[in-house]
Amino acid sequence: MMKKYTIKDIAQLAGVSKGTIDRVIHNRGNVAKDVEDKVKQLLEDIDYQPNLIARNLKNNRIYQIGALLPDPKKDAYWEVCSDGIQQALSEFSAFDIRMNTFLFDPTDTKSFTAQHKQLLDSAPDIILMVPLFYKEAKNVLEQYKSLNIQVCTFNNQIEASTANFIGQDLYQSGRVAAKLMHSIIDKGDMAIIHIDEKYKNAVHMQEKEKGFKSYYEDLNGFHDDILKCKIKYTETEDKLRDFLKDHPNLTGIFVTNSKAFHVARLLESENKNHIKLVGYDLLEENVNFLKNGVIDFLIHQNPRQQAYLGLKFLIEYLVFEKEIPGKHLLPIDIINSENVKPFLRA
């Protein structure tokens, strides 16, 4: 087992007083630079972790965490995020952590802004956030920064922001989708379909589109068309049907979010299973269409793990004073009918 070092042990190893070690660990200053560097190197070498549970109980501190997240009742994709959040809270149950979650409609920027204002009224120490809408998210992130509130974002990255991010490389994700499509069709027109979200603000879909197109731009000998279709949730079936009629040469469709099942349902009912389909996420409807072959591939974005890591990093920042990674990218998992089972939630 790894040895647990006391302040006295570290002081003996460094050849300094226990008071000096205490000042370095708690960043209290009044330590010569060369001594401070020596102690910090020693702490790193022995992987020192202070007994923060005991210190927290002694200080009786309450940590207030605010979360600004999409409402899972409006979009089932976000349901598993609560599991990740509960896992992180469970791991740090020894600390007095209060979690205030504010849910916004993922199709409504006004809802996002209103919930942000309520979150600020709760006076959070730190914030976990999904910056779904570019303009609005950029504004609120600037407010958090001005208030010196540490923020961790997940799922969608606002590049101009200094906020920490957990998720996937969205551009590369689009390229992976194109590579998958290229592996199952040789020629014919393709379509990139954006469903439901406010496209002008949905940076994650734009980045996936850019990545998808870039793959084919780099591909020698590709001369077919890559079409684009933006569809509101309320008009999905009718607009999709019209789109398919207007483009009879389609051989592949890439859906840039978790709504591939809408397209799959129509392809099945219209007997157009020759059109290959690539989408995202392990929603139950998507998995069913994956298993019966209407959806060919799903890219797993793992929102549960994103939410878990985001909250874990924030709590460690509060109680361990541990630096949060500026960007933590998860693997781009490729799911087909043969390997889907291990990825499903128990």
Image: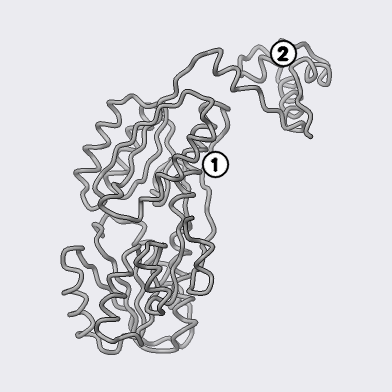
Q: Is residue 214 depicted above or below 120 in this figure? A: below
Residue 29, image x, y percentages: 63, 14
Distance from Cα at disc 1 to Cα at disc 2: 28 Å
In percent of width and height, residue 246 lies at 20, 85
Q: For residue 129, which quarter of the picture?
A: top left
Q: For the N terminus, give its image quadrant.
A: top right
Q: Is residue 23 above or below residue 325?
A: above
Helix, strand or loop at label 1? It is loop
Q: Residue at x 20, y 85 (%)?
A: 245
Choose the circle earlier in sequence order: 1 or 2: 2
Residue at image position (21%, 49%) is: 108
Say what secondary structure mark 2 lies in. helix
Marking on residue 20: 2
Task: Give the residue type at disc 2.
Answer: Thr
**CA neighbours of label 1 inside 10 A, class few (<14), some (14 to 19), many (20+):** some
Question: What residue occupies the far front of the structure in this picture?
Answer: 346
Q: Which mark is residue 50?
A: none
Give residue 293's quadrant in the image: bottom left
Q: Is 52 or 331 nearer to us in this picture?
A: 52
Q: Which residue is mark 1?
A: 325
Kind of residue indicated by mark 1? Pro
Describe the colour scheme in one phrase.
one colour
